[in-house]
Amino acid sequence: MNDAEGAGEPTRQRSREFLDRMAERLGAQATVGAVFGEPIDRGEVTIVPVARVRLQVGAGRGRRGGFRAGGGVSASPVGYLEIGNGGARFRSIPDLPAIARLIVANGFATCMILCAVGHVRRSGRRHGGHGHHWKHHLPG
């Protein structure tokens, strides 16, 4: 190890220790209670809300030598358990933002395909209506 590598070691160690402490504190918030909500009794059926919990931490050193760190816990509903005399089953809740992203991505892909088809058709008209064939580019 050279002197330059050794100089950063105490900072790396402090960073690891800081991230460990932050993860421990944030992780304490990400309990089973955050994933499974309080049961709700409705006659013969009990509903238990279910969430996806994410723990995120990060740290780094800036260009000017400063140290920055941050993190957070987020939870989003994914469904619920329905518990009754007939047993228990999980019912999912649709992820509307993910569905919206999928619709936008499909629209973009459709637009790109239609633009490509239009380009090929226009290219064919410029070459005497015979289309732009890849065979014209082969040697020999």
Image (cartoon, rainbow, N blue to C red):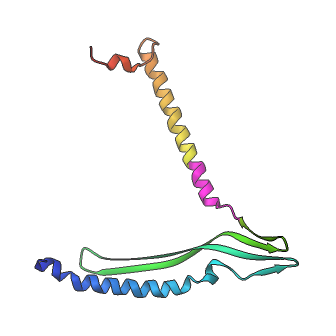
**Main secondary structure of the magenta stretch:** helix
In-front residue for pair 137/87 = 87
Q: Position of residue 19 (x, y in %)?
A: 38, 83
Q: Is residue 138 left or right of residue 36?
A: left
Residue sticking out furthest to the right: 43
In-front residue for pair 20/71 = 20
Q: Is residue 15 above or below residue 118?
A: below
Q: Position of residue 116 (x, y in %)?
A: 48, 31
Q: Position of residue 127 (x, y in %)?
A: 41, 14
For the point 35% across and 16% down, the residue is: 136
Question: Residue 110's quadrant in the figure?
Answer: top right
For the point 27% across and 17% down, the residue is: 139
Q: Is residue 51 magenta?
A: no
Tell me the magenta residue range. Answer: 92-104
For the point 23% across and 86% down, the residue is: 10
For the point 51% across and 35% down, the residue is: 113
Q: Is residue 15 left or right of residue 79?
A: left
